[in-house]
Amino acid sequence: MFTNVQPIAEELHQQQNREFIYFGKHHLSVETGHTTGIENVDNFLKNLIISEKMKESSLEIIDDLFSAFTDFTHELLNLSLQMNDCENSISSLYRNDFDYLILGAGPAGIQLGYYLEKSNHDYVILESGKSPGTFFKDYPRHRKLISINKRHTGYDNPEINLRWDWNSLLSDSEEMLFKHYSKKIFPKC
């Protein structure tokens, strides 16, 4: 996915003179698969023993995170729709000559649409579900986000904080950061 998004990020960089380090070539070059930095992570996880109570508690936390994430993507889509003239958005759906076609109104699709809109690009987002983030209504089955809500990183630099925030979508608004939606470490889906 990052390989496919990289050319779009480069074009946006050229137009806005802004580096998109979270979905451009920088992110592609440093993406680690979100490992924890522990040597032999796979072996560590395979040998990890947790009680049934801890497992249930962990799944509840993950459910809470995914629930908050779903709410967050719905709010972001609503904000995007408010930014557009609704009549133009609806009438544009009857065209078939867009410069960009975004498949899916999940986090990546909505975020890409946000930046294409800011750059005045001609695009459309197609979603097979009834609403944005449909995937998160059923998955993950344990109903929790799998990346922790890193509200505090120990840094004051917003770019560093965002690098460790795997749940927020990129936005020009501080209010849109995921840490403002939930204080739980693993919110529900």
Image (spheres, helix red, strand yellow):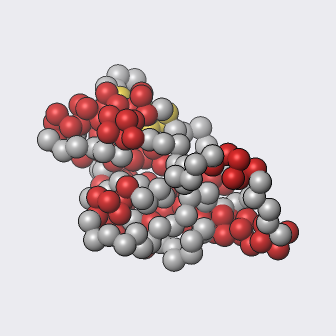
Give how far across and how far down residue 82 sits, in percent: 34, 58
- In the picture as drawn, the residue positioned furthest to the front comes out as 39
Along the line of sight, which residue is nearer the eye, 73 or 126? 73
Which residue lies at the image location 35% right of the left edge and 22% below the top edge?
A: 97
Q: Is residue 138 above or below residue 116?
A: below
- In the picture as drawn, the residue positioned furthest to the top comes out as 97
Which residue lies at the image location 82% right of the left edge and 73% below the top edge?
A: 53
Q: Is residue 156 above or below residue 31?
A: below
Give how far across and how far down residue 63 sits, in percent: 68, 65
Give how far across and how far down residue 24 sits, in percent: 33, 37
Along the line of sight, which residue is nearer the eye, 31 or 91? 31
Residue 36 falls left or right of residue 96:
right
Q: Is residue 97 above or below residue 9?
A: above
Q: How many marks?
A: 0
- In the picture as drawn, the residue positioned furthest to the bottom comes out as 183
Which residue lies at the image location 66% right of the left edge and 70% below the top edge?
A: 61
Residue 8 falls left or right of residue 45:
left
Task: State the quadrant of the C terminus.
Answer: bottom right
Figure quadrant of residue 158: bottom left
Which residue lies at the image location 22% right of the left edge and 43% below the top edge?
A: 19
Can the viewer see residue 93? no
Figure quadrant of residue 146: bottom right
Residue 100 falls left or right of residue 37:
left
Can the viewer see residue 29? yes
